[in-house]
Image: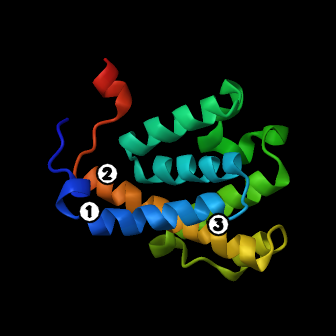
Amino acid sequence: MSNRLDYNQVAPAGAKALGGVYGYVTQSGLPPVLVDLVYLRVSQINNCAYCLDMHTRELLKKGLKIEKLALVQAWAEGGSLFDERERAALAWAETVTRVAQTGVPDEAYQAARATFSERELVDLTIAISVMNAYNRMAISFRNTPAAVLEA
């Protein structure tokens, strides 16, 4: 795989604006591991190799155990490996990422609201949205995962 173009160079103001949203999420107060789990799950759904590589590495750096990392895609069957907030965040990430199929039903919203405050839910949805945007940029322009560059 080779890059089609470097969107950071072509549209630096746009890339900076997207980075500003990413920075907002970082400062939002949501736990960093929770955010990275959501980023990883969104990237799994979208099949974004670049982002999968990046967020897997981030979670490992943050001390996430490999057993848990291996089961992110199947978190619903992961039992006690995922706590209540992680399970709620991953479920919300799935329904929001698949919005065209799910329509984000009331039951999904109510389940997320049972776990997260209004502000947390908005911030979580912003995180999901920015990762969907990054996935689309990376896939469209063929960003090369670090693992491929290191091989």
Neighbor class of circle 3 (other Cα within 10 Å; few <14, some 14-19, many 20+) is many
- Image: 105 above or below 75: below
Which label was assigned to residue 124? Answer: 3
Residue 95 position within the rendered picture, expressed as x and y whole percent measured from the top left: 59, 67
In this rendered view, identify the residue nearer to me: 74 or 24: 24
User: Is label 1 in contact with label 3 (beta carbons under 8 Å)?
Assistant: no
Q: CA distance from mark 3 to mark 2?
A: 21 Å
In this rendered view, identify the residue nearer to me: 143 or 25: 25
Q: What's the colour scheme?
A: rainbow
Pair 1/3: label in front: 1
Image-quadrant location for residue 64: top right
Q: Which residue is mark 2?
A: 138
Mark toward the start of the polypeptide (1 vs 2)? 1
Q: Which residue is mark 1?
A: 12
Mark toward the start of the polypeptide (3 vs 2)? 3
Name the residue rendered at 75%, 70% in the picture. 112
**Camera sees residue 136:** yes
Q: Residue furthest top?
A: 151
Going by the numbered disc 2, the residue's amino acid type is Ala
Residue 96 position within the rendered picture, expressed as x and y whole percent measured from the top left: 56, 69
Going by the numbered disc 3, the residue's amino acid type is Leu
Residue 24 position within the rendered picture, expressed as x and y whole percent measured from the top left: 57, 66
Image-quadrant location for residue 63: top right
Give the left or right position of residue 150, taking residue 108 as reference.
left
Residue 72 position within the rendered picture, expressed as x and y whole percent measured from the top left: 63, 41
Q: Quadrant of the C terminus?
A: top left
Disc 3, SS: helix
In this rendered view, identify the residue nearer to me: 133 or 41: 133
